[in-house]
Image (tube, rainbow, N blue to C red):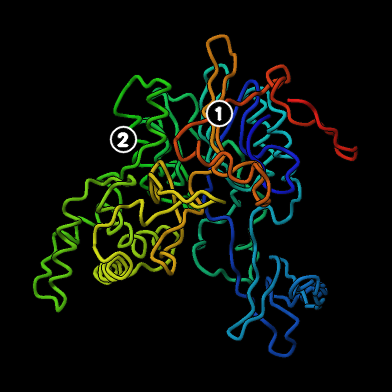
């Protein structure tokens, strides 16, 4: 396997092997529930369940709190448990939590089986374990099969309850047991349209017309997200625009730097441009901002002079809504963007690359892309104190993987930094950043024979490291 890991992972979490590969995005189905317990007024350690009082289980947990340097303290805290799951006492009541796979510890087995998969049957068998509670999977293999799986361990729930709110904790009817079978999860396999995708958007928009899942086919208890991201919209627009897309076309799509006209940001800008702001107390500044936004071509290239005002306005509104937070007032968001740009740049239309930066080691460069575009550079919801966004997420490790008609693998990839993610003294701390910023990749030397002549050192865990000649 080749691909990406997180610290401590003994296997690839997102990558490819000789015959198949997959990519993940985070999905957000409803996999957790909160129950309000009815506590015995005579005994706070008892709760009512199906007409009888039950005693809360009590345990003690020891936690280590690090202070600074080598100094830490150990504290003990009471842990409470009900038939539903862990319990939290609050001034306004006691609540129990229940969440998917809380009773399982075999996610390691699920990922291990994915790494061992040789074909579509093996891959499905690994996901059928339902050991991995949630993730979108986009799949491809050497046979030409593609698929999208909205993977999740969906609790088997009684549809008569409102699972979006706090549930009654005193009845077994509201206590789900077990999970819906894997065959019921939303998926698209070998679609006629020839493509699948996901960019943290709803599974109901994951392929071409007639191929993607339909909401009516799934119970409301699944809690499928309905959010639409700009990246999802652009994928769909660009993939559907041409019935024949080659490798170069696909790579160009991946580096697209535009917002869809149907995106929430574009619609926000359209609403603001259409408003009559001439009677506002700060009308001069607002009208000047409208003029900048009116000329925006929906791009987020480094040289774009309207993207900064659009993005700074959109993040408190669109960005907050996408992460489930209350959005800011639209006009106030525009005023905030005006103030930030005037304070730090003295103008409403600085180049986007002056505002949005990529910094790593000695590299300090403009970003050529932006939040929620396919060439994704993202920071926080607001710029730093100097008025700049420092890219901290978005595009990271990615690969272009192909199998030819004989099933032979070829792959190219890049990491935004380098293989030494924490060691600033390492030559590999930022050695891939220039290639990443130039939208270039390096070949993945997958087989041992391909690696000859490129190996810097060889070692086995637990044995001394011996340097090898290049």
Residue 237, disc = 2
Q: Which mark is residue 122?
A: none
Q: Secondary structure at mark 2?
A: helix
Instruction: Please say if 339 is above or below 173.
Output: below
Q: Where the C terminus falls, by quadrant?
A: top right
Indicate left or right for 298 with 464 as reference: left
Q: For numbered disc 1, what is the local secondary structure?
A: strand
Q: First in sequence, mark 2 or 1: give its number.
A: 2
Name the side, left or right, on which 319 lies relative to 360: left
Callout 1 crowding tier (Cα within 10 Å): few <14, some 14–19, many ≥20 = some
- Check disc 1 and report the residue beneath it: 442
* Nearer to the camera, 89 or 7: 7
Residue at left offset 39%, top offset 42%: 232
Indicate whether 55 appears above or below 254: below
Q: Residue at x 72, y 76 (%)?
A: 52
Please indicate whether residue 177 sits to the left or right of residue 336 in the image.
right
- Where residue 196 appears, as percent x and y from the top left, is 45, 31
Q: Nearer the viewer, residue 305 or 34?
A: 305
Residue lying furthest top: 406
Can the viewer see residue 62? yes
Q: How many marks?
A: 2
User: Looking at the image, is 306 positioned above or below residue 320?
Assistant: above
Rendering coords of residue 429 (x, y %): 63, 46
The answer to whether any part of residue 184 appears in the image is no
> Which is more toward the observer, 83 or 113?
113
Residue visible at 53% across and 55% down in the picture = 30
Give the label, 2 or 1, closer to the camera.
Answer: 1
Would you identify the image quadrant in which residue 122 lies? top right
């Amino acid at each position: 396997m080749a691909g990406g890991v997180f610290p401590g992972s003994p296997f690839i979490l997102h990558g490819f092997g000789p015959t198949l590969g997959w990519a993940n995005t985070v999905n957000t189905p409803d996999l957790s529930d909160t129950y309000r317990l009815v506590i015995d007024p005579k005994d706070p350690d008892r709760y009512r369940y199906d007409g009888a009082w039950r005693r809360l289980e009590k345990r003690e947990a020891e936690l280590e709190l690090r202070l600074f340097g080598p100094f830490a303290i150990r504290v003990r805290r009471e842990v409470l448990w009900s038939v539903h799951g862990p319990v939290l006492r609050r001034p306004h009541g006691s609540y129990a939590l229940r969440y998917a796979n809380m009773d399982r510890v075999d996610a390691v087995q699920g990922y291990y089986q994915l790494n061992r998969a040789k074909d579509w049957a093996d891959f499905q068998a690994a996901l059928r374990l339902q050991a991995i509670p949630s993730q979108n999977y986009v799949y491809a293999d050497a046979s030409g099969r593609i698929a999208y799986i909205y993977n999740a361990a969906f609790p088997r729930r009684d549809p008569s309850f409102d699972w979006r709110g706090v549930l009654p904790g005193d009845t077994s009817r509201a206590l789900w047991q077990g999970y819906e079978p894997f065959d019921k999860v939303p998926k698209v396999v070998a679609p006629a349209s020839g493509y699948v995708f996901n960019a943290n958007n709803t599974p109901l928009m994951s392929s071409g017309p007639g191929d993607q899942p339909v909401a009516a086919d799934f119970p409301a208890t699944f809690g499928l997200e309905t959010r639409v991201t700009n990246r999802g919209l652009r994928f769909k627009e660009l993939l559907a625009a041409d019935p024949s897309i080659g490798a170069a076309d696909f790579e160009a799509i991946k580096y697209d730097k535009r917002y869809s006209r149907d995106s929430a940001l574009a619609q926000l800008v359209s609403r603001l441009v259409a408003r009559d702001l001439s009677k506002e107390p700060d009308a001069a500044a607002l009208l000047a901002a409208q003029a900048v936004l009116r000329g925006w071509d929906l791009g987020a290239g480094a040289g774009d002079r309207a993207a900064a005002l659009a993005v700074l306005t959109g993040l408190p509104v669109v960005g907050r809504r996408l992460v489930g937070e209350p959005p800011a007032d639209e006009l106030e968001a525009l005023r905030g963007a005006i103030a930030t740009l005037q304070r730090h740049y003295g103008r409403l239309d600085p180049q986007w690359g002056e505002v949005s930066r990529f910094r790593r080691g000695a590299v300090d460069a403009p970003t050529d892309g932006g939040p929620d575009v396919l060439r994704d550079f993202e920071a926080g919801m607001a710029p730093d104190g100097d008025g700049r966004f420092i890219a901290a997420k978005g595009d990271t490790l990615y690969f272009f993987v192909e199998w030819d008609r004989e099933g032979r693998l070829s792959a190219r990839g890049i990491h935004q930094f380098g293989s030494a993610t924490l060691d600033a003294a390492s030559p590999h701390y930022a050695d891939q950043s220039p290639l990443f910023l130039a939208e270039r990749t390096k070949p993945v030397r997958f087989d041992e024979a391909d690696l000859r002549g490129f190996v810097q050192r060889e070692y086995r865990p637990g044995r001394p490291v011996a340097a090898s000649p290049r």
